[in-house]
Image (cartoon, rainbow, N blue to C red):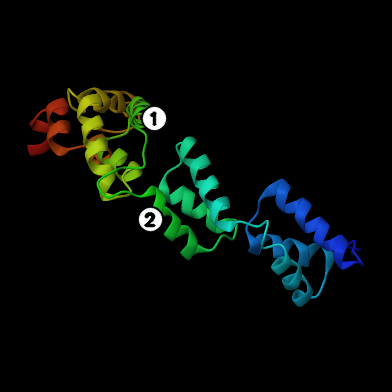
Amino acid sequence: MKKQIQDKEALKNYAIEYYLKYFPSTKKLEEKLIEKFLWDKEIIAEILENLKSIIDEKTNIENRIKYMLDRHKNLNYIKQNLSQKKFDKALVDEILKSYFLREGESLLDENYLRKKIILFKEKGKSKNYIKMKLIEREEDKNLIYSLLEEIFSEGEAEVIKGEYEKLKGKFERKKIIEKLLRKGFFYEEIKKVFGENDFTS
């Protein structure tokens, strides 16, 4: 049986303690109180109204966004994370636009991106694959394209050869070429590695 607090003041104190420990969204706090103590929704709404002086949803969202950006989380991750925690979607969008999203500027960190692209390359991923994974906004394109040119300065031949070595004992050359095309490698880059005959015969 769920524990119930019989006194409104005790419930209010629990709500304060819970909020200051976890800094949840108001919606999540409300759900927690209803789920844990089976109180009437109207009474809980009254308690939450009384706590407005300490609950700062806007600052809470800002701090969470800053924390996630410091951990190199992308925009989709940030929005999904805040949505799962029941923060108001409209308020999240407003804060992102007002304080974080700048026209012509990417949210992504260049040094972190460089390491991530190098890791993708080492795992045999194509430039097209990397673009699809990392570009979320128009503002991301210039930075990511520039890093791809830097990291793939000699093209994709090296990566294609590595992928070929992994697949050559399992499939015919024609089948390997088809697989490489599906992985997003550029047609011209594959031709350089395999030669014209594999494409014309």
- In the rendered image, which quarter is residue 152 located in? top left
- In the picture, which quadrant includes the C terminus? top left
Q: Which of 77 and 117 is in front in this view?
A: 77
Q: Name the residue under label 1.
A: 112
Q: Mark 2 points at which residue?
A: 97
Q: Residues within 10 Å of mark 2 (few under 14, many from 20)?
A: few
Q: Which badge, 1 or 2, is on the more N-terminal residue?
A: 2
The residue at the point 70 percent across, 69 percent down is: 49
Residue 124 x %, y %: 33, 29
- In the picture, which quadrant includes the N terminus? bottom right
Q: How many marks?
A: 2
> Left or right: where does residue 91 sit relative to residue 43?
left
Q: State the SS at label 1.
A: helix
Q: At label 2, which amino acid type do we have?
A: Lys
Residue 5 x %, y %: 90, 64
Q: At label 1, which amino acid type do we have?
A: Tyr
Q: Nearer the viewer, residue 86 or 201?
A: 86
> Left or right: where does residue 139 sit relative to residue 98?
left
Residue 73 x %, y %: 46, 41
Viewer-nearest of labels 1 and 2?
2
